[in-house]
Image: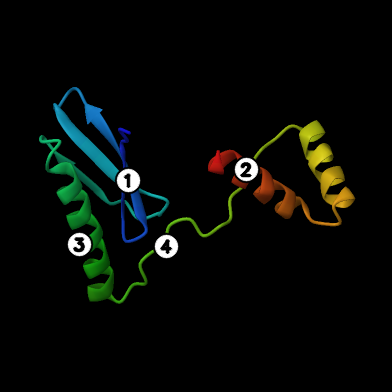
Amino acid sequence: MNSSVLEYKGYYANIRFDSESKSLIGKIEGINDLVTFESSSPKKIEKEFISAVDDYLAFCKEVGKEPEKTYKGRFNVRISPELHRQIARKACEENGTINSVVEKAIRAYVMN
């Protein structure tokens, strides 16, 4: 399967093609720090990503900063009030929480 997503040391990047510069460009996703990389060669873009992650981790260590972790397990989702109500009711029926119902639904969706 072809994918434009790379992963290394728990960091992810989505690769896109920039038609103006005729290069592949990536950015580490899920962190507030801006870490980008690029290559004109599809065969070298993964190497550039790995270098970007390693450079980011080395820089953080050098300046005494804790590297940001990707995806802490919390995010805000905006849904319709009706769906919110249905989720809350489902949680109540299962003697659970809204978070547990949403996690179960997302897990089922992602695992398919």
Disc 1 marks a residue whose amino acid type is Ala
Could you tell me which residue is drawn at 42 percent across and 62 percent down? 69
Of the image marks 4 and 2, the number of the one nearer the N terminus: 4
State if disc 3 and disc 1 touch (CB < 8 Å).
no
Residue assigned mark 3: 55
Alpha carbon distance from label 1 to label 3: 15 Å
Of the image marks 4 and 3, the number of the one nearer the N terminus: 3
101 displayed left or right of 43 = right
State if disc 3 and disc 2 touch (CB < 8 Å).
no
Say few, some or many: other residues with alpha carbon within 10 Å of mark 1 (under 14 / 14 to 19 / 20 or more): many
Residue assigned mark 2: 108
Q: Nearer the viewer, mark 1 or mark 2?
A: 2
At mark 3, the secondary structure is helix
Of the image marks 1 and 2, the number of the one nearer the N terminus: 1
Q: Nearer the viewer, residue 6 or 35?
A: 6
24 displayed left or right of 34 = left
Residue assigned mark 4: 69
Residue assigned mark 1: 13
- Quadrant housing the N terminus: top left
- Quadrant housing the C terminus: top right
Say few, some or many: other residues with alpha carbon within 10 Å of mark 4 (under 14 / 14 to 19 / 20 or more): few
Of the image marks 1 and 3, the number of the one nearer the N terminus: 1
Tell me where residue 82 appears, x and y as whole percent. Answer: 81, 32
Disc 3 marks a residue whose amino acid type is Asp
